[in-house]
Amino acid sequence: MPAPAMVEARLRVIYGDTDQMGVVYYANYLRYFEFARSEYIRARGHSYREIEKEGLRIPVVEAHAHYRAPARFDDLLLIRTRVQQLRRASITFSYEVLRDGEPDVLCTGHTVHACLNPAGRPIRFPPGVVALLGAEAGTQPEKP
């Protein structure tokens, strides 16, 4: 069975994620993106820890979030994650955050990640990681 091109992850908002107004503090959406990204990789049969053991680092080099409506304490959030673009040495994930069971999107965003070796130098994604992260998503690395 092919790996899913889009993965849904669920996360419940804890009280500590909210601000004085009772809504999710804006920076926590980046944590939610990270959680969903890890679940995306896990759903495709691997873990980020295993990718690191292979000598790769995939740090965030850019992050963007567009807030449309607030999430609140105890909301069960549904975070949809997909690979938007996979290039030779970078990958872009996109995200949609909704309340589980509701159609309205609360937040959209994306993160761009570099592919680095343990010394911090840019490298190409190995073919196995390309297949893991993006082949079924319809994205391919650029040709040299």
Image (cartoon, grey):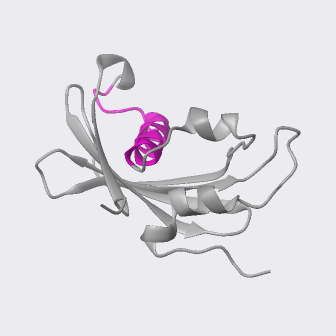
**28 inside magenta stretch:** yes
- State the residue in front, 132 or 37: 132
Q: Can you tell which quarter of the image residue 119 is in?
A: top right
Q: Residue at x 77, y 61 (%)?
A: 124
Left or right of residue 105: residue 117: right
Q: Quadrant of the N terminus?
A: bottom left
- State the residue in front, 8 or 15: 8
Q: Quadrant of the C terminus?
A: bottom right
Give coordinates of residue 43: x percent, y percent: 37, 46
Q: Can you tell which quarter of the image residue 140 is in?
A: bottom right
Q: Residue at x 35, y 25 (%)?
A: 18
Q: Residue at x 81, y 57 (%)?
A: 123
Give coordinates of residue 79: x percent, y percent: 32, 47
Left or right of residue 71: residue 116: right
Regarding residue 19, the answer to whether it shows in the image is no
Q: Residue at x 49, y 39 (%)?
A: 34
Q: Is residue 64 above or below residue 71?
A: below
Give coordinates of residue 6: x percent, y percent: 35, 60
Residue ranking furthest to the left: 101
Left or right of residue 118: residue 102: left
**139 inside magenta stretch:** no
Q: Is residue 17 above or below residue 57?
A: above
Q: Is residue 13 above or below residue 68?
A: above
- Per the rendered image, the range of residues in magenta is 21-43
SS majority, magenta: helix
Q: Can you tell which quarter of the image residue 2 is in?
A: bottom left
Give coordinates of residue 141: x percent, y percent: 65, 73
Residue ranking furthest to the front: 1
- State the residue in front, 49 or 20: 49
- State the residue in front, 127 or 138: 127
Left or right of residue 115: residue 11: left
Regarding residue 9, the answer to whether it shows in the image is yes
